[in-house]
Amino acid sequence: MSSDFSLWVYLSQKPLTWLTLTLIAYAVADRLAAATKRHPLANPVLLAVALVGIVLFASGTPYRQYFEGAQFVHFLLGPATVALAVPLYEHRAEVLRSLLPMAAALIAGAVVTLASVIVIMVLLGAPLPVIASIAPKSVTAAIAMGVSEGLGGDPALTAVLVILTGVFGAIIVTPLLDSAGIQDWRARGFAAGIAAHGIGTARALQVNPVAGTFAAIAMALNAVFTALLTPLALKALSG
Amino acid sequence: MIVALSVLLACQLAGEVLARGLGVPVPGPVLGLIILLMALMARRGLAALMPAEVNDGTLEAAAKALLAHLSLLFVPAGVGVIQRLDVLGQHALALGLALVLSSILGILASAMVFRWVARCLEKRA
């Protein structure tokens, strides 16, 4: 028993353990998603996070220790973002033909998202710092946290809301646009990227390459647009 | 494969340097994406200056291998979130409601406007 325990103490401090756990949890989650024919509710991010969360909770492992191993996966987000240039390049003719619809959809999506967040939060009586924390939630975490902090929000709260928004958007986008009767893969992907940044883009890439391309563009455009729009909207609100 | 990964990392590094240097509110990797896109557009003319892997399909294969499992890369951040759900605090209900409704409205607005503008353009053409 005591030697088993010392083995566990040794292993639990190795990044290898947590890196392996992350990959296995994702492999299981991805199998489950594939088995349900990529049903939106069987979201691989959500499933893998739940599996890892259960193991960390059961073993009493702090997040800092887990991240020692998981950071190697997290690091790949950078090069993966750069890699989005490849589908973008391959579908460039379609992208160039869609510049006007993209510009209009960017403005509509960003403005409606931001306005509805602010109106709902004001109606429910939330204080300004909480509104500043949720306002940039649809853009990629690094940008959203910077915007939130600059406006007096809590970047940790923003990071949580960004991930929750990504998972929710990735789950809802398929049934929502099916029921709205929108079949154009460009429009579907673009909406996923606007509302659910990288996690929505990951979903779109698994459903259709054109949708994935347009999601990636929407994510990049919205990161800049919402970063500029949010301070203006909040200034109008407080001033 | 190693060269393809080096190209992706080099573009990201160049993007980070540009983002810091110019002080623009765009993440380094997004600028890296733009740099790689420009390199791909110019690759036929500049083939002599670029490693063979940029032109022979190796770069595409590596990029697609990475993107096929983009979901995996969000797992470490996602695990951090479920351990910090306490930050939602007393405003959890308002935050949840705003998150859900604004996501639904944002998706619908963006997809419907996209389709509407695309159809208007097709009719004129």
Image (tube, grey):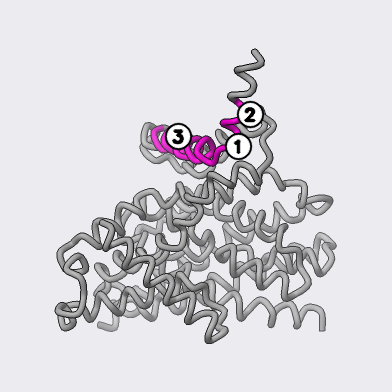
**Image spot of residue A199 (x, y percent):** 49, 54
Name above or below for residue A128 compared with residue B62.
below
Of badges 3 and 1, nearer the viewer stands 1
Q: In the rendered view of the protein, which quadrant contains the N terminus of chain A?
A: top right
The residue at 80%/67% (across/down) is A129
| Separation (CA) of disc 3 from disc 1 | 18 Å
Within 10 Å of disc 2 (Cα), the crowding (few <14, some 14-19, many 20+) is few
Name above or below for residue A197 compared with residue A72.
below
Within 10 Å of disc 3 (Cα), the crowding (few <14, some 14-19, many 20+) is some
**Image spot of residue A116 (x, y percent):** 67, 66
| Separation (CA) of disc 2 from disc 3 | 21 Å
Classify mark 2: helix, strand or loop. helix
**Which residue occupies the extreme top position in the image?**
A1
The residue at 57%/36% (across/down) is A52
Whether marks 3 and 1 lie on the same chain: yes
Q: Which residues are magenta?
A: A8-31
Residue A184 visible from this viewpoint? no
The residue at 76%/55% (across/down) is B94
Amino acid on which the number 1 mark rests in the picture? Gln
Write down the residue under mark 1: A13
Q: In the rendered view of the protein, which quadrant contains the C terminus of chain A?
A: bottom right
* Residues at circles 2 and 3 in contact by the CB criterion of under 8 Å: no
Name above or below for residue A149 compared with residue B79.
below
* Residues at circles 2 and 1 in contact by the CB criterion of under 8 Å: yes
Task: Tell me if A200 is positioned left or right of A141 in this view.
Answer: left
